[in-house]
Amino acid sequence: MGKKKLSRFRELESLDRVFQPPLEEIFGKDYHLKGRWSRDVFGNDHELILELGCGKGEYSVGLARNYPQRNFVGLDIKGARIWTGAKIAQEEGLSNVAFLRTRIDFINSFFTRNEVAEIWITFPDPQEKRRRLKKRLPGAHFLNRYRAFLKDEGKVHLKTDNLQLYEDTLELVRFNDLPLEQYSTDVYNEGWSDEVVSIQTYYEQSFLDEGSKINYIRFRLPAGKEIREWPDDSE
């Protein structure tokens, strides 16, 4: 491991609102902040929004700047990436954003029923070798796990440069009759003015520089509705 990465790992320990629980604290059990993020971490009762696979945390930080009356948690397994967002948040004094270093497989150890208002999935690894949406972040496997802590009819946002991932997700949403609010295969050429286009990640800027189009979907997830796998995804 390079010296730069090691230095960032060490600094993560001292940055505000960065949580890196060891496996023994979450494997098969609830983390001590489950159900208490807004109260114990942010000191308020504002709604909580997650960014899954947050990378360098640009979206979490950007949303925190734009919406000071909401709380944000960026989740990723890569500490060297999280360091960037956590460092910026501390330097800017953003008190409404935190970062959680863990695998998304353990997400239900961290959040309780109705604790989360919205989920952002920004430029996830499309895992193109996997069949369709099988166990990818916007797939049925994870959507059913999100239902355990997302408020009823809570919003799920997907932003990606990968057209196949976008199309597969849109197909799954329609197959399950989920409330579909907004979708596009080219958000930057449709005159949007909200957080979908006002915040860009490092990777997104690279994709745009290469001439790629950015796809976006927003849908709602009913708490009482079991999400079915698309038939091609089932084993």
Image: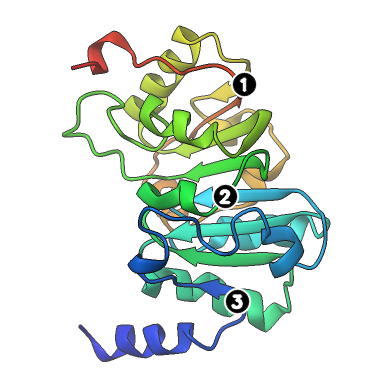
118 horizontally vs 93: left or right: left
Which label is found at residue 222?
1
Q: Position of residue 64 (x, y in %)?
A: 71, 60
Q: CA distance from mark 1 to mark 3?
A: 35 Å
Kind of residue at disc 2: Phe
Residue shown at 46% from the left, 88% from the top: 11
Q: Earlier in the sequence, mark 1 or mark 3?
A: 3
**What residue sits right under mark 3 in the picture?**
88
- Give residue 114's position: percent from left, percent from top: 68, 39
Return the mark for residue 11: none
Residue 18 is situated, as x and y percent measured from the top left of the image, at 54, 74
Decide: few, some or many residues near mark 2? Use Cα within 10 Å; few <14, some 14-19, many ≥20: many
Q: Residues within 10 Å of mark 1 (few under 14, many from 20)?
A: some
Number of marks in the rendered image: 3
Q: Amino acid at mark 3?
A: Ile
Q: CA distance from mark 2 to mark 1?
A: 17 Å
Element on which disc 3 rests:
helix
Q: Is residue 209 visible?
A: no
User: Which quadrant does the C terminus fall into?
Assistant: top left
225 over 191 or under it: above or below:
above
Question: Residue 27 appears at what percent x and percent y?
Answer: 35, 57
The residue drawn where x is 38% and y is 83% is: 9
Looking at the picture, which amino acid does disc 1 mark? Pro
48 vs 108, nearest the viewer: 108
Q: Earlier in the sequence, mark 2 or mark 1?
A: 2
Q: Judge from the rendering whether residue 56 lies leftward or rightward of residue 17; answer left or right.
A: left
Whole-number angstrom distance, CA of label 3 to CA of label 2: 25 Å
Q: Are marks 2 and 1 in contact (CB under 8 Å)?
A: no
Q: Camera-side residue: 123 or 109?
A: 109
Element assignment for label 1: loop
